[in-house]
Image (spheres, rainbow, N blue to C red):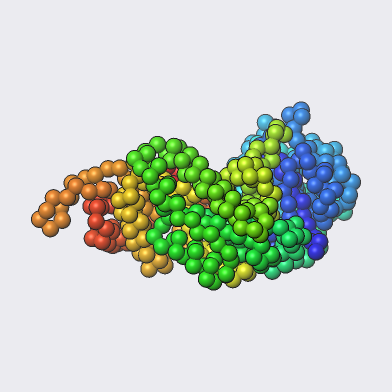
Amino acid sequence: MLHDAILIIDFGSQVTQLIARRVRETGIYCEIHPYQSADVAFSKLKPKGVIFSGGPDSVTREGSPRAPQAVFDAGVPILAICYGQQTLATQLGGRVEGGHAAEFGRADVEILKASPLFDGLWEVGKRYPVWMSHGDRVTVLPAGFEVVGTSENAPFAIAVDEKRRYYTTMFHPEVVHTPDGGKLLANFVHGVCGLKSDWTMSAYRAEMIAKIKAQVGSERVICGLSGGVDSSVAAVLIHEAIGDQLTCIYVDHGLMRQGESEQVVGMFRDHYHIPLVHVDASEVFLSELEGVSDPETKRKIIGRLFIETFEAEVRKLAADGKGAPTFLAQGTLYPDVIESVSFSGGPSVTIKSHHNVGGLPERMNMKLVEPLRELFKDEVRALGRELGLPEAFIGRHPFPGPGLAIRCPGGITRDKLDILRKADAIYLDEIRKAGLYDVIWQAFAVLLPVQTVGVMGDYRTYDYVLALRAVTSVDGMTADFYPYDMPFLGRTATRIINEVRGVNRVVYDVTSKPPGTIEWE
């Protein structure tokens, strides 16, 4: 099925992905392409509308980014945002200048005239909050344009050419700080472009199953399960398409949370009846990690051992008489695909490797099956619900590939990992009891390489310090600590100290990202 689509031309804004997410939330399919390849993408996608993103450059600079002429020649509606407004104005005969008062942060836009862009939303004569981030400004509009909204430092805050269906804003409708921004984008794709909402996870599921069948044929596929949402959703979707041609390999490195391996294996084997090879390699991993304290060395050891273990299992499968697997499934997501293209025009950077299968396709000469590569994380969760995965699994907090190894700074021992597992389980239990699990982006315990003196009963103790971490975030790029109330922290600390032998002190990490990271290593 061909979907009506929107093309988003990326001029380098840090929030271009937000435009795509807002458009998809309206039920419309869209793709992001950098301005350098936008002409090819436009020809291939045949969009019913185009959105120009913002960007860090100045259109006054010689050689600065421009939109392809084909977009203007095609007569499709255009919404141009910030830098997008400026390049559109320049390319159509207007003028942009620097040196005027800039606008960064909140501003109010006064509506001067009605427009389909804010039909049913904004009224003439009233003012509405928006988010600005610009230094240059349009000083002369191209022929055919008129101002329909203005702000203190952006006289042409909203300028439109209704006849050609060109709509431009100096503010950013895609960010949360423009409260009505999502509705403005919905007005553009539905009202102006006339598109219908046909981008659903139900439709995606059916289309992707057909694509997987066509791609794979009768060949075998292997999938490296990490226990995370992405690889799990990919595995269930592929299994629905090709059944027992898929074999999942779950390498248990001994660094998972309490009961996690049992949960993953049980769900795939018993509930979904997906062929699964469960490799308990914990002895190999923990023996090599024993006493290793450098975080990067830990990661390298875990990555190398994973690949070696995975390869060994694939060789076993290849020798079982059913034919060697020719496809490797990965849970690559759309942000990974976007990031694989260099905006500056230099060579493409490598797509971020899935933390459990990095380097495998090249080493094993396998073809890739990536059924999630068109989806954002929230869409993967929606697809997981469509496929019937349990909510408790779909909504799980992110968990790092190296597992508890990086939540145990300093040297790793089996005893330390056992202490950490027990403490982490209690912490998450208290979070769930308080109804906070779905409010928090990520929460976990960290066992510090520090021992302190304590008193239990009449006895002196000399045990470990445990740090608790909880953050709120949208995408993990920035994060803030979660503001627990003190009774919660007190209750959790008391349980951990009472129930986990080896811990006599609990602290809470109140560092945001930046300057810190979410994980400790």
Question: In the displayed structure, does residue 334 sit left or right of residue 144?
Answer: left
| Residue 293 in sight | yes
In the image, residue 190 above or below residue 15: below
Picture quadrant of residue 162? bottom right
Q: In the rendered view, does 103 fall on the left or right side of 90?
A: left
Q: Residue at x 46, y 65 (%)?
A: 263
Instruction: Give the number of marks.
Output: 0
> Residue 195, how many percent across, how many down?
79, 63
Q: Which residue: 46% across, 40% down?
A: 301
Question: Residue 415, image x and y in percent?
Answer: 30, 51
Residue 272 vs 455, above or below: the answer is: below
| Image coordinates for residue 385, horizontal then vertical, percent | 59, 68
Quadrant position of the C terminus in the picture:
top left
Residue 459: image location, x then y, percent: 11, 53
- x 76%, y 28%: residue: 62
Image quarter (top left, top right, bottom left or bottom right) of the N terminus: bottom right
Residue in the image at 53% along x and 45% along y: 308
Q: Is residue 184 visible?
A: no
Farthest residue, direction top: 62
